[in-house]
Image (cartoon, helix red, strand yellow):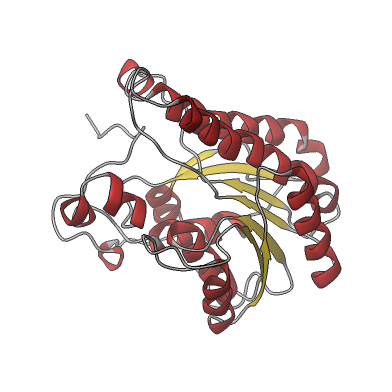
Amino acid sequence: MTTSQILAGRTMIMSGGSRGIGLAIGIAAARQGANVVLLAKTDVPDPRLPGTIHTAAAEIEAAGGQAFAVVGDVRDEESVERAVAQAVERFGGIDICVNNASAIALASTEELPVKRFDLMTSIQLRGTYLLTRACLPHLREGTNPHVLSLSPPLNMSPQWLGAHPAYTLAKYGMSLLTLGWAAEYAEHGVAANCLWPETLIATAAVQNLLGGDAAVGKARTPEVVADAAVEILTRPSRECTGNTFIDVDVLREAGVTDLSQYGGTGTLEYDIFVDPPA
C-alpha cells in the first residue's frame, strides 16, 4: 500500500467507532487524509469500556484527518438523518459509508433474552439499513463511493447456524443487505462490500465476552482490519463490489507478507464464521 494520502478530500461516515475496530478504521483513514464523521451514543465514559465518541474524534484528528462527532443512535431514523445532513453540511458530501456498529450476544435460543435479540437486530439490521439508505443519494454523487459493512461471509455450515442463531441472523443480515446494495447500485458505481477478520481481534468485546487475557493472546490487533478496510476503500468502486472479504486475504493481495506486526502472542484463534483450512 502507498504512503501518500490516498483518501484525501474524501468523507467517511461510520456508525460506532468510539473504540476497537471502528476507531482503528477511523484512524487508518485519517492517516490517508480522510474526513471522518462518527455517529455513536458514547457521549460520556462507560466505566466498563474505554473511550467516547469525543476521545475517538481527538485520536482521529491526531492521526491527520478531520473528525466530526455526532452523538446519536444508529437505530433512530432522526439521528441518522441528522448525522448525514451534518456530514454533508460540514464536508460537502459523503464518499464512504462504514457500517460498524454492532451488539453481540452469543447465547443459545432458549437462554437469549428477547430484549437482546431486539437489540442485535435493531443495531445490525435496522441501523445498517438506515445509515446506508440515508447515505446513498450522496454516495451516488461521491468520489469512488463505497459502502463497507463489518460483517461475515455467509457460511451456511450447521456449526455456525446452530451456535447462536440470533447473533448469526443479525450479522448475516448485514451481509445480505450489503450484497443486495452491490447489485442494486452497480449501475451507479457505488461499491458495497463486507469485511470480516480471519482471527479474533483484541477488542474490549473479546476481552470481556470471549475469554479475557487468554483470548486476547490468540487475537490480532484491530489495525489488521483497519488496514484491509483502507485497501478496499481505495479500490475502484465499479470494479470492487459484492464481496465478502477476509482481512488477511485483502492484505496479501495488496502485497503485505508479514502479518506479525498485527500481534497475537500464541496460536491464533479463528473468528466466528471462519473455518480453518482443511
Q: Residue at x 63, y 56 (%)?
A: 14
Q: How many numbered discs, if any?
A: 0
Q: Nearer the viewer, residue 39 or 157?
A: 39
- Residue 88 appears at what percent x and percent y? 83, 63
- Residue 38 appears at what percent x and percent y? 63, 63
- Decide if residue 244 is in sight here: yes
Q: Please indicate whether residue 27 sits to the left or right of residue 199 in the image.
A: right
Q: Nearer the viewer, residue 234 or 121?
A: 121
- Decide if residue 200 is in sight here: no
Q: Nearer the viewer, residue 96 or 144?
A: 96
On-image quarter of the C terminus: top left
Q: Is residue 62 above or below residue 267?
A: below
Q: Please indicate whether residue 135 sits to the left or right of residue 247 in the image.
A: right
Q: Please indicate whether residue 214 sits to the left or right of residue 54 in the image.
A: left
Quarter assignment of residue 16: bottom right
Q: Residue at x 29, y 57 (%)?
A: 220
- Residue 183 appears at what percent x and percent y? 71, 31
- Residue 143 appears at what percent x and percent y? 78, 60
Q: Residue at x 65, y 35 (%)?
A: 126
Q: Please indicate whether residue 142 sits to the left or right of residue 233 in the image.
A: right
Quarter assignment of residue 260: bottom left
Q: Residue at x 76, y 31 (%)?
A: 184
Quarter assignment of residue 265: bottom left
Q: Nearer the viewer, residue 275 or 163?
A: 163
